[in-house]
Structure formats: C-alpha cells, structure tokens
C-alpha cells in the first residue's frame, strides 16, 4: 500500500476538487448577469481615436478641412471640429475580501456576502474583458481574453479565507494608472484605507469601493435577548434588549458610509453600497456605471 500523502497536501487537493465543483455554476451565473448590462467601452475622457462623441471645439490652425464639422459650423460664424473620446485598453484589478465576516448570511435561503461578492466581481470582470480591457485580481497578472474569465473564476473560488473577521488588500500590489475595485463589508473601521488610497493617488490609480452587506446588517431586525458573535468567534456581545441597540447601530452604519464616501471622494475614487437582498443586476449596473465615470 502506498503511503498516504501529507495531511496538508490531502486537504489542499480536497479543497481544489471542492472548489472545482462550483466553477461551472459561478461562470454561468456571472455570464448571465453580465449579459443584463450593456458593456460599452470606458473612454479616457480625452480627444483621440474612438467611436463616441466627446465635444465640439473651435477649429485651430492645425486642423484640416476634413476635420471640420460643417453642420455644427453652419450654425455660427466659427468653424468647429467634432472630437471623439479616446478609447484604449485599460488595466483593472479587483480585490474581494476574504475576511470571515464575508461568510455571513442572515437567512438560510440567502447567499452569503462572499458568494455575492464573487459573482459581482466575475461579472464585472467579464464586462471589462468584453471591452478589450486587461483584468486580474489585485496582486495577480492582469490579462485579456475569454480564458482570463475562467482563470479569475478559479482564483475567486480557490482564494483562502482569512483567519480574522476582516482583512485588507496589499497596497504594494497597486500599479500605475490601474482601475481598482475593492469589495468588502467594511463593518470594521478600515484604518488601512487612507494609506491605501494615498498610495493609489500617487500612482495615478483610481477605482471604486463597494460596501456589500446582508439585509440584516442594514436593518438590524433583532429583538429581545440576542447573543451576537462574529464569524470567527473572536468577538461576542450578549444583549438582553437587542432592539434598544438599533438606533445606535444604524447611526454608526450611516457614519461609516459617510466616512467611506469621504475617503473615496478625496482620492478621486467612487463609493457605492449594495445588499445581498438587492437584485444582482441592479448592483452590477450601478457598479459598472461607477467604473465609467
């Protein structure tokens, strides 16, 4: 009889096999979700080769006769040129929190935050890949093409969960002029965020912060005696009157959202929040629109 492989190797193999079972479903769901959003192409908001109209500008000495838009010019005493918006391949990086807290769901028939985050991340990546962009998970190589969607699905499913309830992305993985998407619940104050955004700003990197919560985390529908425990078990709080905590909790949540929005805005980023109770297509559409601004 051949010796058994080491426990760590056996566990890794079992995990890989289990992860593989979820890949077809994740890819199919992401493809169907992405199909509900019109991808388009994100321009760079400057004049250049492209299909979308950007602006009319007065003709200058360097513009040839073919560049003149005669229909627009006929409405004034000045010649105008019709500029198009430059559209070139961009590079995007996506980070999905692996914190234990992302495994929470307030109902047995509702997907966890981690499951919804993976779905939105992959569907968003598919939209960008269809637009000819290079996409990767933060810290991994960004590539283009259909095969990259499958690589991303594999990486998202196989990504290890953090030991703690919350984690943080590696600012050292940022690259110049990337677009970055951060997906997490941000329930613990992310003290790492100002430094991360400052480093991103120094690299000319912009992006979107998506705060993803469960409906129970948004409404706090608890009453009576409740034992609150974090997913990792590291945090515990027992209350005899949970309903009395609702006002303070909702106020703290609003404060957190305002803080995240302020941090994002100061760095030239966008902030958006979503719930696992929302339709995935609605969340993806809003996220996609934020990416294009």
Image (spheres, grey):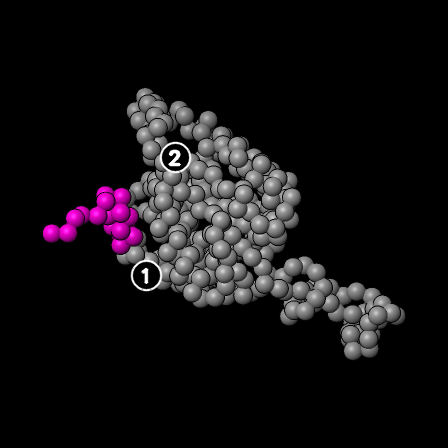
Name the residue located 51 percent from the left edge and 52 percent from the top edge: 93
Q: Find the residue positioned furthest to the left.
A: 1
Q: What element carries label 1?
A: helix
What percent of the width, then of the height, locates residue 278? 42, 49
The foreground one among 20 and 269 is: 20
What percent of the width, then of the height, locates residue 29? 37, 59
Label 2 – label 1 distance at C-alpha: 28 Å
What percent of the width, then of the height, locates residue 24? 32, 61
Please say if 207 is above or below 232. below
In this rendering, would 31 be left or right of 179?
left
- Residue 7 forms part of the magenta stretch: yes
Q: Name the residue under label 2.
A: 165
In this rendering, would 247 be left or right of 24?
right
Q: Find the residue positioned furthest to the front.
A: 2
Name the residue located 36 percent from the left edge and 62 percent from the top edge: 28
Question: Over which residues does the magenta segment extend?
Answer: 1-18
Which quarter of the figure has residue 236?
top left
Q: Find the residue positioned furthest to the top.
A: 240
For the stretch drawn in magenta, what is the main secondary structure?
helix
Please say if 90 is above or below 102. below
Q: Name the residue under label 1.
A: 24
């Amino acid at each position: 009889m051949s010796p058994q492989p080491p426990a760590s190797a056996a566990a890794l193999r079992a995990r890989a096999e289990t992860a593989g079972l979820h890949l077809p479903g994740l890819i199919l769901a992401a493809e169907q979700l992405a199909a509900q959003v019109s991808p388009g192409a994100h321009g760079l908001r400057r004049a250049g080769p492209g299909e979308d109209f950007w602006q009319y500008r007065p003709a200058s000495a360097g513009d040839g006769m073919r560049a003149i838009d005669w229909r627009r010019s006929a409405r004034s005493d000045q010649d105008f040129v019709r500029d198009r918006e430059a559209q070139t391949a961009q590079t995007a990086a996506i980070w999905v929190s692996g914190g234990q807290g992302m495994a929470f769901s307030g109902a047995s028939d509702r997907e966890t935050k981690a499951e919804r985050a993976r779905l939105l991340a992959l569907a968003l990546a598919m939209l960008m890949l269809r637009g000819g962009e290079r996409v990767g998970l933060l810290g991994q190589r960004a590539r283009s093409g259909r095969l990259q969607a499958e690589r991303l699905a594999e990486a998202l499913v196989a990504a290890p969960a953090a030991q703690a309830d919350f984690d943080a992305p590696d600012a050292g993985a940022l690259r110049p002029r990337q677009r970055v998407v951060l997906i997490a619940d941000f329930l613990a104050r992310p003290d790492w965020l100002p430094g991360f955004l400052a480093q991103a700003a120094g690299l000319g990197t912009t992006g979107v912060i998506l705060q993803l919560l469960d409906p129970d985390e948004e409404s706090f529908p608890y009453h009576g005696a409740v034992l609150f425990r974090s997913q990792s078990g590291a945090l515990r709080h027992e209350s005899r009157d949970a309903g009395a905590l609702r006002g303070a909790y909702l106020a703290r949540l609003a404060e957190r959202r305002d803080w995240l929005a302020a941090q994002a805005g100061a760095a030239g980023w966008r902030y958006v929040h979503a719930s696992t109770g929302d339709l995935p297509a609605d969340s993806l559409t809003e996220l996609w629109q934020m990416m294009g601004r």
